[in-house]
Amino acid sequence: MQFSPTMQRVITALAAKFGLDLAGAEGHLRIELGESMMPLVIEVLLPNLLSVAHYYEQNGDLIADPDVEFVITVQGWAPTAIRSYFGDRSYVNNPRGQADLAAFCETWAANIEAQGYGTRGRRSGDDDGAAGVAVAA
């Protein structure tokens, strides 16, 4: 199993900055940088399972592009599935595909960091008061 240490570092830093408990049973955080950038959503699905996604709206529907699930282990974060506009793929039993997904996640994490989600975003709450939206200042 291949890991994505850059994604782990970037998302852990964002979660700490905006108050999302990655070790919790559930939770989510949405970070926006304004109209020109797709929102970044971090969601704790289960203990030791989370997703990182970009979303855009098309005809009133939210479309994930992409949405990657990570299994959190003591060795690191392993991406195991990806969903996008083009379809869903699971790489749990496909070592080559999973390694390719991990490499993609390393590049994507560097882009998330370079685009300034951690430096230019600010958080605002959603309706239930949980960890919510961060909007660029």
Image (cartoon, grey):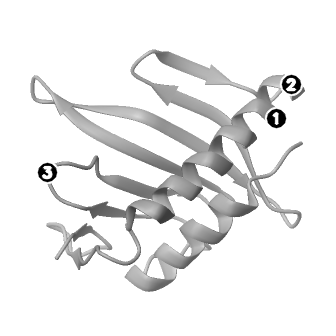
* Type of amino acid at the residue the image marks with label 1: Ala
Secondary structure of the residue carrying numbered label 3: loop
Which residue is at 74% across, 54% downward?
Answer: 4
Secondary structure of the residue carrying numbered label 1: helix
Q: Is residue 99 above or below residue 40?
A: above
Q: Residues within 10 Å of mark 3 (few under 14, many from 20)?
A: few
The answer to whether mark 2 and mark 1 are in CB contact below 8 A is: yes
Residue 51 horizontal/vertical position (percent): 53, 49
Secondary structure of the residue carrying numbered label 2: helix
Question: On the image, numbered disc 2 is attached to which residue?
Answer: 96
Residue 50 figure quarter? bottom right
C-alpha span from label 1 to label 3:
33 Å
Marker disc for residue 88: none
Which residue is at 20% across, 74% downward?
Answer: 125
Residue 50 lies left or right of residue 14; in this view the side is: right
* Type of amino acid at the residue the image marks with label 2: Arg
Question: On the image, numbered disc 3 is attached to which residue?
Answer: 35
Which residue is at 14% across, 67% downward?
Answer: 127
Residue 11 horizontal/vertical position (percent): 55, 66
Residue 116 lies left or right of residue 48; in this view the side is: left
* Type of amino acid at the residue the image marks with label 3: Glu
Residue 115 horizontal/vertical position (percent): 39, 60
Mark 2 or 3, closer to the camera? 3
